[in-house]
Image: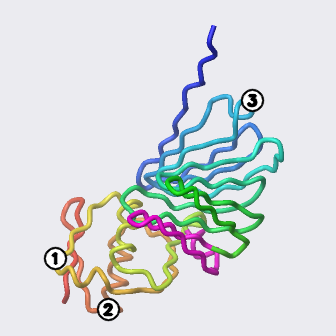
């Protein structure tokens, strides 16, 4: 009899929610809104491999015999024991891997090119050209979502509203496309309503938001 590979189990976290998973080996994963994690049900017995669509923070239990691997749409992240964040939403143009402690190896699937990350470094893999760039960052900027905050550092309004849309489950429509490129830096808590945060942005910048049903329409004042 041939031994069949175990089927993957799946966890999906809907928009507006966050979920924490503790695997059998003690590895902790926090999944952000609109994220999907697939894994082998006999996780500890077979292999420590998961597939991620979306964003997740990992605290991986060290095991030299069975390295931990995260598969995304473009890169594989391999670790022994470490803390790191991966942002790999399918509608983004890049995959962001941010290392808090330990070390991780990132492998580009097509070319097999690899990069080694050290603490306080972030790898940006751009999906359209397969390039990997590494730079030094403050990891807490990438981890704001874990602590109930939106943290932006020189990010475009398009990217910011994309993140807000995932949390508040709204669609974004830019009436004036040039507004999408405006850049912002800020650190605010998650409010019950998206309107509270949008009004704060309106006060500081020449931008107007109109909320209609589940759509936010963005235009210049």
| Identity of the residue drawn at 77% across and 42% down | 66
CA separation in Å, label 2 and label 1: 16 Å
Dot 1 or dot 3, earlier in sequence: 3
Is 110 a magenta residue?
no
User: Can you tell which quarter of the image residue 220 is in?
Assistant: bottom left
**Relative horizontal placement of residue 56, taking residue 102 as reference (left or right):** left
CA separation in Å, label 3 and label 2: 54 Å
* Nearer to us in this view, 189 or 111: 111
Name the front one of labels 1 and 3. Answer: 3
User: Can you tell which quarter of the image residue 126 is in?
Assistant: bottom left
Identify the magenta region. 122-144
Label of residue 205 in the image:
2
* Nearer to us in this view, 185 or 147: 185
Q: On the image, numbered disc 1 is attached to which residue?
A: 175
Query: In terms of secondary structure, where does tag 1 sit?
Result: loop
Residue that protrudes farthest toward the left in the picture = 175
The colour mode here is rainbow
Report the number of numbered marks.
3
Residue that protrudes farthest toward the front in the picture = 111
């Amino acid at each position: 009899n041939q031994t069949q590979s175990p089927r993957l189990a799946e966890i999906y976290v809907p928009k507006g929610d966050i979920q924490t998973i503790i695997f059998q080996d003690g590895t902790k994963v926090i999944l952000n809104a609109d994220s999907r994690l697939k894994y082998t049900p006999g996780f500890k017995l077979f292999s420590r491999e998961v597939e991620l669509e979306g964003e997740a923070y990992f605290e991986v239990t060290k095991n030299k015999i069975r390295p931990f691997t995260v598969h995304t749409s473009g890169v594989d992240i391999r670790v022994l024991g470490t803390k790191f964040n991966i942002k790999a939403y399918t509608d983004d143009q890049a995959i962001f891997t941010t290392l808090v402690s330990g070390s991780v190896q990132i492998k580009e699937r097509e070319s097999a090119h690899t990069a080694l990350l050290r603490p306080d470094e972030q790898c940006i893999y751009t999906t359209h050209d397969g390039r990997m760039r590494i730079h030094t960052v403050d990891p807490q900027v990438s981890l704001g979502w874990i602590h109930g905050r939106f943290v932006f550092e020189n990010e475009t309004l398009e990217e910011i509203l994309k993140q807000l849309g995932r949390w508040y489950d709204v669609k974004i429509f830019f009436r004036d496309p040039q507004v999408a490129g405006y850049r912002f830096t800020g650190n605010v808590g998650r409010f019950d309503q998206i309107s509270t945060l949008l009004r704060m942005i309106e006060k500081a910048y020449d931008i107007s938001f109109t909320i209609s049903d589940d759509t936010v329409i963005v235009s210049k004042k």
